Each structure stands twice: as C-alpha cells, then as structure tokens.
Amino acid sequence: MMTEMAEAIGEAATRPTMRFVTLKSEEQLDMQTLHRARDQAVRERTSLMNQLRAVLLERGVIVPQGRAKLRLRVTELLRHGTGELSSRIQLLIEDMLTRWLALDERIAAFDAEFAAEAKRDEAARRLTSIPGIGALNATALVAAVGDAETFARGRNLAAWLGLVPRQATTGGKPRLLGITKRGSKYLRKMLIQGARAALPTLPRR
C-alpha cells in the first residue's frame, strides 16, 4: 500500500502540469492557530449570550436583539433587583456575565494582536487598503495563502476559497448555482462579512 502511494506521488511529480502546495512557515501556522482560538472564543461568547437570553425569557424578561442591549438589561437586573429573578438565578446570571466580560477581554486582546501584525506585515498592510478587508481578514488571508503567486489569477484563489458558483450543464446549457463552499469555512465567512460591511459605503465613494 505504502509503495503504491510512493509510486503515485513520484509519478505525479513528473507531470509538467502538476501544481505543488507551498509549505506554511512557522509564523503562518502560529497566526492560523491564533485565529482559531479567537473564533472559538467568539463562539463561546455567542453561546453564553443565547443561554442568558433563554434564562431571562423563561422568567418573562424579553431583551431586544443586540449584544449591547443584552448587557445593559442584565446589568440593570443585577443592579436594581426588581424581583423578576430569584436570588439564586441572580447569582447564576452574575457568574455568566463575569464569564462574558472575560471572553470580551480575550477577544479584544486577539484583535489588538491582529491589528499590530497587520501594521507590521507588508502583505497584510496592503490588503487592509481594500474596502471590507480589516486586520482580521488581512492576517487570516496572509496566514492561509502565503505567497499569492501560487495562484495564476484571482479566480483560482476564489475557487480555492469556495466563492465561485457551481455549474450544472443540461443539454449543453450551463446554469450557475450557489457558491461551492469548498476550502476554508472560516476565511469564507470572514470575507463575506467584510463584503457586507463594505457594500453600504461603496456607492458614496
């Protein structure tokens, strides 16, 4: 089995059209690890917020959408003690709020580190000049892609990210479907969020 795999790799290496993947540097691997850690912290915070909303909703306390509004309402309930919550639930919510604030601090520390890296790295600094690309997207792209010359054109990079439409051909007529969603889910999510944030301001420019 191993011999056959080695022979297949050797045969593929002799093909003139074969493309090879560039190994990531230690800095790229470290940056990707930091992005994964930040993403996990964001997911933990979202889960904690949803749990807080559920606890309050069970007791008839409805909070409008938005992180700031939820924090304000929880702070008011803990500060004034209106009788809507029992003393034990107040202690539980206070503990959840403490964990939430700790996660906010962790995420802010990651963001500050990414912002510093985006200023230090030349490629990331150039990427931040594109509308919708901030320090998060720039450092994530540089860490994942590395040398962009690996891709012959922009469409190849888009296909690698899973941002190009799928094609279905019937009777010689091609139809474009939704994006393929291949490649890095994290990178694709960040780029789409950046594009949505940039779209409202583009007409004014």
Image (cartoon, grey):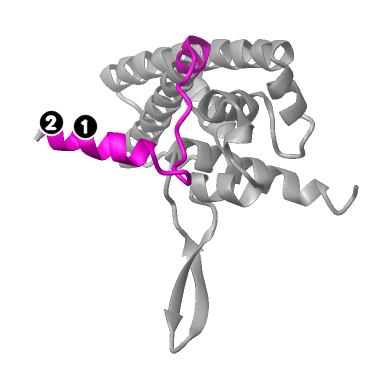
Question: How many dots with numbers?
Answer: 2
Where residue 8 sits: x, y (%)? 24, 40
Q: Amino acid at mark 2?
A: Met
Where residue 119 sits: x, y (%)? 73, 14
Q: Helix, strand, or loop for circle 2? A: helix
Which mark, residue 194?
none
Quadrant for residue 52, please give it: top left
Q: Amino acid at mark 1?
A: Ala
Where residue 132 sits: x, y (%)? 71, 39
Q: Are marks 2 and 1 in contact (CB under 8 Å)?
A: yes
Distance Cα–Cα, label 2 vs label 1: 6 Å
For the residue pair 161 and 62, the one nearer the viewer reads as: 161
Assess whether residue 26 is covered by the magenta stretch.
yes
Where residue 30 sits: x, y (%)? 46, 12
- Does residue 32 lie above or below 50 as drawn? above
For the residue pair 12 and 38, the one nearer the viewer reads as: 12
Over which residues does the magenta segment extend?
3-31
Assess whether residue 145 is covered by the magenta stretch.
no
Taking the spot 28% from the left edge, 35% from the top edge, the residue there is: 9
Taking the spot 45% from the left edge, 32% from the top edge, the residue there is: 21
Q: Helix, strand, or loop for circle 1? A: helix
Q: Residue furthest right?
A: 205
For the residue pair 1 and 14, the one nearer the viewer reads as: 14
Residue under pointer 2: 2
Residue under pointer 1: 6
